[in-house]
Amino acid sequence: MDSLCVGLDSRGWSTITARSADGAVAALGDFRVEAVIIDAAGFDLRALCGALRIADRPRRLPILALCAPGVDSVATGADFVMTTTPHPVQAANRLEQMVRAAVAEDEAELRRDTFRLRGIEPPVAALDRTPLRILAAGAADRRFLALSNALTGRGCEVVAAPTPYTAFDYLHEQPFDAAVLWGADDHAPALSIAAGMKRNTRLYHIPIALYLRGEPGDLGELYGRGFAEVAPRDTSELELADRVHTLAIWHRRLQDVRATLDAAEGTELTDGTTGLFKRDVFAGHLARLSDAMQARRQPLSVCVLRIVETEALTQAREGGWLEKALPQIGAMVSRLVRAEDMPARLGAEVFALALPATIAAEARVAAQRIAAVIGCTAFDAGADRSPFVTEFTVGCAQMQDGEGPAALLERASADLDRG
């Protein structure tokens, strides 16, 4: 665990080590803890997880447990169980995923409260209840076939793809909850598939496991390329099947949360032109969100994006072309925000984002990324006219102690003129 802590510290996570259950519970009261890693040896894991969750209420505390092989992950009370100490890059990626998932689940509950307070029953998402789907990409091999059989035995639907080309055909034809790539001696085919998935916004979040045939090389580099699991060649098919099955369950859980948060699209809660939340809905939710973030001791940031006036934009507005582009702009904002972030249309050409559990610097980067992506899109300006682009100025503010939601939004708006 000590080497894992050093590795996490070097990657921007500040670790606190507690040697006892009482010390771990006390740390939650003394520090703002985002997630917990428990080395289960010597602990009553279920009891410790329960005590930590009680101590950290009302926040949803993400817990990653390191357990011996064969432990029933559900019975531990932890969110995620690993049987070996993870590589620091792998641990950092997993913790980030767990933290954001917990924030998204808290946000889903809070939004349902917002809707009910407005006299609106929360929209019900169409959740996927089909068997978990796993893509197994690689040439037929005894071990690979054994892994596929082990996953099938766990109730998964496994689709075999012998080449990267067929893998991408399948990925574009149907949704998957995880992918297992068979590593050749040089990993080249697997790296090609992984790189392509990470460049695609629809496939980006699918967890990928690499089953090695040869030597692993630099594990940090492999995890940095987007693999959620890297299994050495001596890893049994049953153990890797357990890992992949857990990753697939986790991915489906995140997809369900996203569907729940997206269910309000196209309802009376959203703006008819952009599909983003209406101004009054945003204001009401921001008030509840600010109270919740203070109770959970988590940061809250708000960003405001305003379309910049240019000569090309003036001409596009006069011809009604900007108004015709707004549905596409709104759709892009919705796709580019994280599941837990709330986008809204504040005015004709002004948009806002509420970003829970996010500091100002991270929020500004997220808003600037959205502005940059939309700024690269050319919109139709009519016959005999060149397409136009939209530029944004970005304002951002992080909630201060004792600050109300109106003041927070006002500071973010005032920051537009300084951005």
Image (spheres, rainbow, N blue to C red):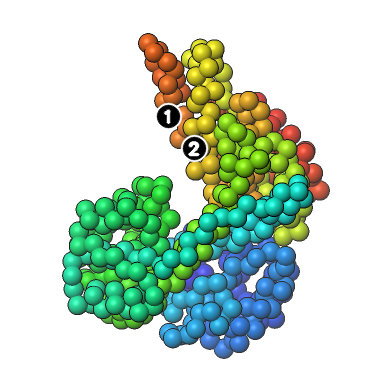
Rendered location of residue 268, percent (x, y) = 66, 40
Residue under the image location 34 percent in, 59 percent down: 221
> Toward the viewer: 376 or 157?
157
Left or right placement of residue 142 versus residue 417 in this view: left
Q: Residues within 10 Å of mark 1 (few under 14, many from 20)?
A: few
Q: Which mark is residue 377?
A: 1
- Up the image or down, 112 lies above or below 208; here it is above
Q: Which mark is residue 290?
A: none
Q: Quadrant of the C terminus?
A: top right
Residue under the image location 26 percent in, 60 percent down: 190
**What SS does tag 2 mark?**
helix
Q: Cβ–Cβ below 8 Å for labels 1 and 2? A: yes
Rendered location of residue 290, percent (x, y) = 74, 49
Tell me which amino acid carries mark 2. Answer: Met
**What SS does tag 1 mark?**
loop
> Which badge, 1 or 2, comes first in the chain's sequence?
2
> Toward the viewer: 61 or 268?
268
Residue 119 visible somewhere in the drawing: yes
Q: Which mark is residue 332?
A: 2
Tell me which amino acid carries mark 1. Answer: Thr
Rendered location of residue 156, percent (x, y) = 37, 72
Left or right placement of residue 269 versus residue 151 in this view: right
Rendered location of residue 74, percent (x, y) = 53, 79
> Toward the viewer: 82 or 166?
166
- Up the image or down, 222 lies above or below 416; here it is below
Residue under the image location 32 percent in, 72 percent down: 231
How many numbered marks are there?
A: 2
Residue under the image location 22 percent in, 71 percent down: 213
Q: Residues within 10 Å of mark 2 (few under 14, many from 20)?
A: some
